[in-house]
Image (cartoon, grey):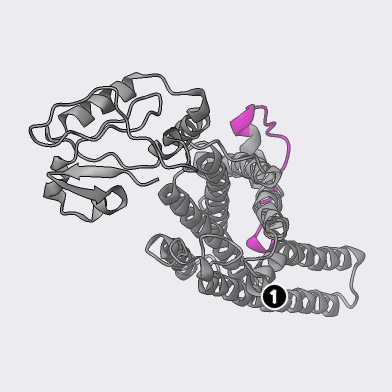
Amino acid sequence: MVMDVMNADTLIPFECAHLLPWHMAHFFIWTVEDNGADAVPPPRHGAPRQPGRRPSPPPGSPPRSALARHEPQPLRRDGGAASRRLKRRADAQPPAAGRAGGNASLELSSRPPAPAALNPWDVMLCVSGTAIACENALVVAIICYSPALRTPMFVLVGSLATADLLAGLGLILNFVFQYVIRSETISLLTVGFLVASFAASVSSLLAITVDRYLSLYNALTYYSERTVLCIHTMLAGAWGVSLCLGLLPVLGWNCLHDRAACSVVRPLTKSNVTLLSASFFLIFLIMLHLYIEICKIVCRHAHQIALQQHFLTASHYVATKKGVATLAIILGTFGASWLPFAIYCVVGDPDYPSVYTYATLLPATYNSMINPIIYAYRNQEIQRSMWVLLCGCFQTKVSFRSRSPSDV
């Protein structure tokens, strides 16, 4: 439909009106009634307005009501005051039924996002972290409560229990910040905290293995000041390296801004988890070598006792066999817990289903749950201190034998 717009004494097609300069748009005055009637062009200068006369549309053209909704409304001569009044009037009117869908979608977009669905794997990790925190908190309390547990051996056990306690708390905090307090920055801090805690736990296990080896290899000089200094230096180095590994993702070594660099453990990068896995493999190989040397020393001591007594008694044979089996269980538990996760971090792809990451990470957390049983609760001095701390029902006539680090 072609509608003529009056500009002075010249008729200009309506479709060409938008090509005029903006300052000439104020000369175009036309009105559109709400019932969809055609617009009435303004009269010429000096000509009286003739109410009721409307130009008839050409035959075959669509009704004016169909085109009025799509035509832009030109500016009025009054500087836009009338258009502002129309806008305020339209805002005051309730929305029509036909626009309800658009308004509803806008309201939904302004609401806070719905909470994420609860993942059963995250629940199991939280439960595992709670059990780890409770077990190791008891060990830390026992060692801090008992003044007798101040030897290098129990300092190492306390370091291991502290690292596992922090790891358990990190698993709980990770669950809370993932489902309750959702923040990208806090989640990154939690991941760094978990990396540092588990790295300190593995490093403490290596320090305990070195301490066991020194107690057998240098049995005569083990309780010297030099051994105490060596143990403290090992712990300081282990916690320092663990803290640096935990700070790497916080200081920028993450994939928050580069999804292509992500690993199977977001937001850690592939190079970051490769470094962590390589460190674990190195520690595992060192522990394996030391435990093999410990087994050799134990067997050599048993052979020397047999030569002195001209035969190997059944008690010495059982003790030697039990010691070797204990070392095998300790190393086997550590390897079975961490090796699947470390291998998957190297060979896994971030596009793989996340269930593979959870299935390998959950057994790794179980190692922190087993450590107190192996290194703390089996020790008779810790058992005695635990009885005194919990219920005070320790009977003095029950004998406890002080054990060496090789027996722990």
Q: Position of residue 7 (x, y in %)?
A: 16, 45
Q: Amino acid at mark 1?
A: Leu
Is residue 239 visible to us here? no
Closest to the observer, 210 or 358: 358
279 versus 73 height, above or below: below
Left or right? Give the position of 231 relative to 297.
left
Q: Position of residue 288 (x, y in %)?
A: 69, 75
Left or right? Give the position of 3 relative to 220.
left
Closest to the observer, 217 or 343: 343
**Label 1 secondary element:** helix
Closest to the observer, 285 or 377: 285
Give the farthest residue toward the top: 93
Q: Position of residue 323 (x, y in %)?
A: 79, 65
Residue sitting at x 35%, y 42%: 71
- Within-10-Å neighbours for mark 1: few <14, some 14–19, many 20+: some
Is residue 224 visible to us here? yes
293 versus 140 height, above or below: below
Q: Position of residue 313 (x, y in %)?
A: 90, 68
Range of magenta residues: 388-408
Magenta span has 392?
Answer: yes
The total of numbered circles placed on residues is 1
Report which residue position mark 1 lands on: 288
Is the N terminus in the top left, top right, bottom left or bottom right quadrant? top left
